[in-house]
Amino acid sequence: MTLREYARKRRFGATPEPADDSGAAPSRRPIFVVQLHHASSRHYDFRLEADGVLKSWAVPKGPSLRVGEKRLAVQVEDHPLSYAGFAGDIPEGHYGAGHVDVFDHGTWSCDGEPLAAIAAGKLDFVLHGERLNGNWKLVRTALRGKQPQWLLIKRDDAFAADREADDLLQDSPAAAAKRAAKATKATKATKITKASKASKASKAKSTRSQAPAATAATPAARPRRSDAAWRKRALALEGARDRPCPPGARAQLTLLRARAPDGAQWLHEIKWDGYRLLADLDAGQATLRSRNDQAWTETFPEVAHAVQALPVREVRLDGELVVLDAEGRSDFSALQRVIEGSSRQPLRYLVFDLLGVAGVDLREVPLLQRKQLLRALLGDTPGVLAYSDHVLGHGPEVFAAAAAKGYEGVVSKRADARHHGGRGGDWVKTKHENSDDFVIVGYTDPKGARNGFGSLLLAQRSAGGLRYVGRVGTGFDESGLRRLLAQLQALHSEQAAVELPAHAPFPRRSVHWVRPQLVAEVAFRGWAKEGLLRQAAFKRLRADKPLQDLGGDRAPLPAAGQGNHAVAARAAASAKKTVPAARGPAKQAKRSASNGNAAKTGAAERKPATAKPAPRASTAAQKTAFSASADAAAAAVAITHPERVVYPGAGIRKGEVADYYRAIAPWLLQEVAGRPLSLLRCPDGAGGECFFQKHNNRALGQHVQAIALKQKSGTEDYLYIDDLAGLLELVQMNTLELHPWGSTVDDPEHPDRLVFDLDPGEGVSWAQIKAAAREIRTRLRETGLESFVRLSGGKGLHVVVPIVPDADWERARDFCEAFAQALAGSAPERYVATMSKAKRSGVIFVDWLRNGRGNTSVCSWSLRAREHATVAVPLRWEELARIASPQAFPLAKALQRAARLRAHPWKEMATLEQRLPGS
């Protein structure tokens, strides 16, 4: 790097050009600037930041956007970084006398080391500007001259066009010079002021060209913006308010769900893996901020420029900043490299919401209408800004298709939702990968040849502060280890933020504690019985997420019956739909977007699954996070008459029933979420008249969902729930017992769970019932099936068999009947397989009838409508011996048991993949 030649040619006391600023810090990401120079020979100056200076070329005809068209570019002396903000007049008699305008400004990128490429005579690069974008190359020629002769060439991509620089002068929407001065840190305000004064003083003497094209780029001559048409369109929308949306409006946040919601009232977008970015445009000037209000305008000048290029002077945008790979998928690692300056890939701002435009507040407008106006505003022109498309309805199929294409997941939003800011039930996310955010509380020393650190120690927020959840030692590269170690060392603390378990598999002397400030996203395979992460891998630091926000997005929906991966595996195999895409950013994204509406044509054909129909393990930390997250929708459910006694024998009131189900929801929703339900409702309490209900009606509540199922009499709406709000609405309607189907709403015709209900006749002891359950377990094992046991909360036990849902109900029922008949035939003195009560005295009825289509059995953790408020509780087989009765867990003891559990008693179900014999 040298600016000696630049300084030699200038007399800085008499010219407004910036002096040598070789001490200036380089930009966070390399900038480029193109300046229109009306010197003795009009030309464009093309400048790229490298090695702390602006490498510069004079391009007589200016850049051409035509693919392959060669433009002579004469390499000139390096310029200081502060020259990127220079605009004004260079007085006569000085080197380069004439007027200088900023034509374009932004950032640039290339693969590899730019100085080496320039030295080699061939530089391939990408521009991210307002006027110039996409792939370019500079090639040095063998032509002789006083200075090196290069060719500037546009490469084939979505930004190529039949235009050149002079054409672009006429349609510039903003003052590039003003933005350039703000965007580069190296620009000093005093130099800009000096340039402005010099410009005014020498205007009469200037010899610059008077051609219209030459003046079109100046701020005074730029085309005026008119918001009138957009204001008229915005005010025509339902709920629009004739007032500006205030800048700094809160971001709408999501809740984590296990299953993408179904139904036409939901729209589904790709979950992009980047940084949430909100843009405020006021009087033509853009301000960028993160969701927690970090200022990002100077960090991403090309995005600010693109927002300012919109055909309005006031707008509020919400979206995700990403880098897209060749298939149109977001790549967070690539985004980090771009921000750090080690990569030159183009940024894309994928916009999914419009909160205000042209002085109209749109926050009370339904989301779908906001998005329709947003799409019109952004258009389909390729550039930094792009519209994030969506699919209406068919959530599980969209999620499956997204998973099959390698996307992180989907974000589902109520199409009629207003924008209220903060977290609520209107926006939910469903991830294909099991990951979560944790705070880093320490690190261990490296071992062997590893540099940096060995592993990070992680914690999760809980009611009592922070709780240690394990460590992560994979997912880092060498440069990442070094950068993260430097950040950790700056946060060194002598005080431990958490208490380590006694059996921690590393020496405590190797631990370095840090202040709990950095948040990391970590992928993992589940939770060990001690409540620690299994097979954790580091994904990224969450600079956009503060510690106090940890757990805020976690809603209590672990996998319902079979989990996200089972839904994805089944639907992805046959989904006819594609996923929504970003519209406009580049050809690769357009390829995805071209099929974006295909998902609206119909539901995917359901195929047999090959995944595991099991609940995921949960932990105390998950349960704490659940209660802390306080789903706004659930909090809004009113429980009327909480003082009314529901269980007279135990003195338990309706409010206490609601409190029980609220507390037990992280466990119970694993059993019922996403399954058709039958309810036992008791308006007069457990001692009064109760009735079963299986059909949905609006009176149950807005969070109780409907699923249309075929019956002999036609199609009927059955009911299901998928969140805490729905569960509490059922409690409000006097539901005591929950009886789910053995299949899910995603695939109701193929059971994934069978139940044998052991119903003892008169004279059968509890010991005999337990022995019967063990015998059934043994006989099921002989057929190749593992099983699990549950206290019914009534008189007997349930033996539960998870299966891959590839058999229909008739086949499942036939198997269960044959099994029960064989058992009864082998020991008729102990078992019976018929319902006849006359034959049940002294024997156990092996009730296989629960396994027909539409038949149900009570779920784990459900209360029973019995005098003492007993609960159906899942057990480990080894626990069964010490259980004194099938009603061993009334409400209070069930809560105590749930609080003590580190993992689901049936956690092994998650690793099973078993089919009916003969499958």
Image: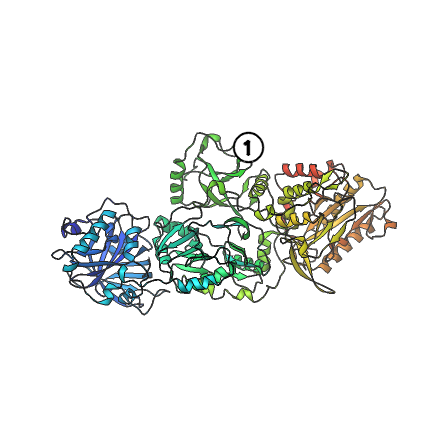
The percent position of residue 805, horizontal first and vertical second, equals: 66, 56
- In the rendered image, residue 146, in percent from the top left (x then y), is placed at 14, 60
Residue for point 67% across, 45% down: 640
* Residue at the bottom extreme of this rendering: 162
What residue is rendered at 18% in x and 62% in y?
208
Quarter where residue 815 is shown = bottom right
335 or 143, which is in the foreground?
Answer: 335
Quickly name the residue at label 1. Answer: 503
The location of residue 148, given as percent across then percent down, is: 19, 59
Residue 707 or residue 567, whichever sits in front: 707
Amino acid found under the numbered disc labelled 1? His
Q: Secondary structure at mark 1?
A: loop
Furthest residue in direction front, as rendered: 242
The number of numbered badges drawn on the structure is 1
In the rendered image, the vertical position of residue 245 relative to residue 447, given as above or below:
below
Q: Nearer the viewer, residue 475 or 190?
A: 190
Image quadrant holding the C terminus, namely: bottom right
> Is 759 left, or right, of 251 in this rendering?
right
Visible residue check, residue 656: yes
Residue 760 placed where, x, y %? 81, 45
